[in-house]
């Protein structure tokens, strides 16, 4: 199978690239910058092509010459960059998506898996203000942040080109994600990554409030597993799938798992909700019935094993970086 991964060096994309390599597939990774730091164990086992997805002529040329069977489209600006420059967010996340989808169709590729986000559900109905929400794929979507708006638009752009050209399209909406690279790329939004990386480096962590916030969180590797499954499964009944643990935990519960792996970690978390300070304080869990049935999705990593994996990959990244400097 000949596969392209746009954004294949990012937080989730790097795991997609890794899992494809482990399957014996040599993917072609498209990214603007050759930063292989999240893939120190896979360098030389995938093909990198420097490409800005806003460059329609270049994208079209790559797709026509490579003749991909399937595409994972994950290239996008993060929330922080999107909020700093909303016009750029629309250009990259939506116009760039349209360019990729048109190239997919024109080149004859048969399937696209789009890396969307469960954050598009982030504005909830007033009548559910005091209850926990279970988010299914048909839940009302009313995003207010530009990064979420562009994800919704990108999903519809993908569906449009899928109808136009006849390829299969599926969007993956993940719950709150953590993993190596998240802190670097997402900053203050990466609370769970902050807890892990501070523990790795022996730094204390203090979060003033939010310890009682219930959320559904998942390790980046598990999201990638579902993305690869959506790419290779013979049949998909839906064009969107939630990927999550299916359960809610508090930030304190996550911190306890960090302490299990790092017994000396100094962590202090205040009570209450809204640890991101965003005003989104709803307790939530994701329904993953579709993914369990169609993608045979089974979460591989529990909290402790995910944090251990995070620790090990973080160490490998540091060793590789030090070796490259030497």
Image: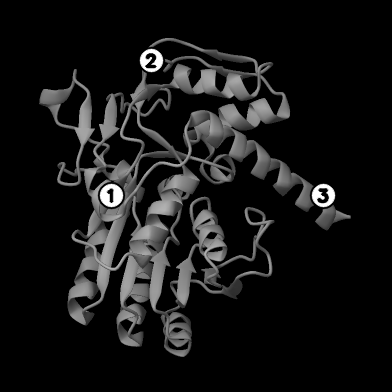
Residue 291 has which mark? 1
Q: CA distance from mark 1 to mark 2?
A: 28 Å
Residue 212 has which mark? 2
Q: CA distance from mark 3 to mark 1?
A: 40 Å
- Element assignment for label 1: helix
Q: Earlier in the sequence, mark 3 or mark 2?
A: 2
Q: Earlier in the sequence, mark 1 or mark 2?
A: 2
What residue would you read off at disc 3? 322
Viewer-side label of 3, 1: 1
**Where residue 112 appears, x then y in whole percent?**
33, 69
Q: Earlier in the sequence, mark 3 or mark 1?
A: 1
Q: Which residue is farthest bottom? A: 65
| 315 vs 141, nearest the viewer | 315
Picture mark count: 3
Q: Are the residues at dot 3 and dot 2 in contact (C-beta closer than 8 Å)?
A: no
- Element assignment for label 3: helix
| 214 vs 292, nearest the viewer | 292
Q: Where is 227 relative to 279, above or below?
A: below
Q: Which residue is farthest right? A: 326
Query: Seen in the image, is 302 located left or right of residue 95?
Result: right
**Where residue 118 appears, x then y in whole percent?**
31, 44
- Element assignment for label 2: loop
Residue ID at (72%, 41%): 315
| 238 vs 151, nearest the viewer | 238
Q: Residues within 10 Å of mark 2 (few under 14, many from 20)?
A: many
Q: CA distance from mark 3 to mark 2?
A: 39 Å
Residue 272 has which mark? none
Which quarter shows the C terminus?
Answer: bottom right
Residue ID at (19%, 20%): 131
Residue ID at (59%, 30%): 196
Residue ID at (57%, 24%): 258
């Amino acid at each position: 199978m000949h596969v392209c991964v746009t954004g294949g060096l990012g937080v989730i994309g790097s795991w997609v690239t890794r899992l494809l390599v482990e399957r014996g597939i040599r993917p072609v990774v498209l990214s603007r910058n050759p930063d292989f730091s999240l893939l120190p164990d896979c360098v030389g086992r995938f093909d990198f092509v420097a490409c800005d997805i806003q460059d329609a002529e270049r994208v079209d040329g790559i797709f026509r010459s490579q003749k991909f069977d399937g595409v994972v489209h994950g290239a996008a600006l993060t929330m922080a960059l999107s909020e700093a420059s909303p016009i750029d967010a629309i250009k990259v996340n939506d116009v760039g998506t349209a360019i990729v989808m048109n190239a997919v169709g024109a080149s004859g590729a048969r399937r696209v898996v789009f890396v969307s986000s469960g954050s598009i559900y982030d504005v909830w109905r007033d009548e559910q203000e005091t209850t926990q929400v279970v988010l299914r794929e048909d839940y009302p979507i009313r995003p207010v942040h530009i990064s979420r708006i562009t994800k919704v638009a990108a999903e519809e752009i993908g569906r449009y080109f899928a109808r136009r050209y006849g390829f299969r399209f599926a969007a993956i909406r993940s719950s709150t994600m953590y993993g190596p690279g998240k802190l670097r790329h997402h900053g203050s939004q990466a609370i769970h990554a902050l807890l892990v990386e501070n523990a790795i480096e022996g730094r204390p962590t203090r979060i003033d409030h939010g310890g009682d916030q219930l959320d559904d969180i998942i390790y980046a590797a598990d999201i990638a597993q579902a993305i690869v499954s959506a790419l290779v499964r013979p049949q998909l009944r839906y064009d969107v799938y939630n990927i999550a643990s299916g359960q809610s935990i508090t930030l304190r519960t996550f911190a306890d798992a960090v302490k299990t792996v790092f017994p000396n970690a100094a962590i202090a978390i205040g009570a209450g909700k809204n640890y991101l300070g965003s005003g989104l304080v709803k307790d939530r869990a994701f329904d993953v019935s579709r993914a369990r049935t169609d993608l045979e999705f089974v979460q591989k990593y529990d909290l402790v094993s995910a944090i251990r994996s995070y620790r090990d990959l973080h160490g490998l990244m540091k060793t590789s970086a030090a070796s490259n400097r030497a």
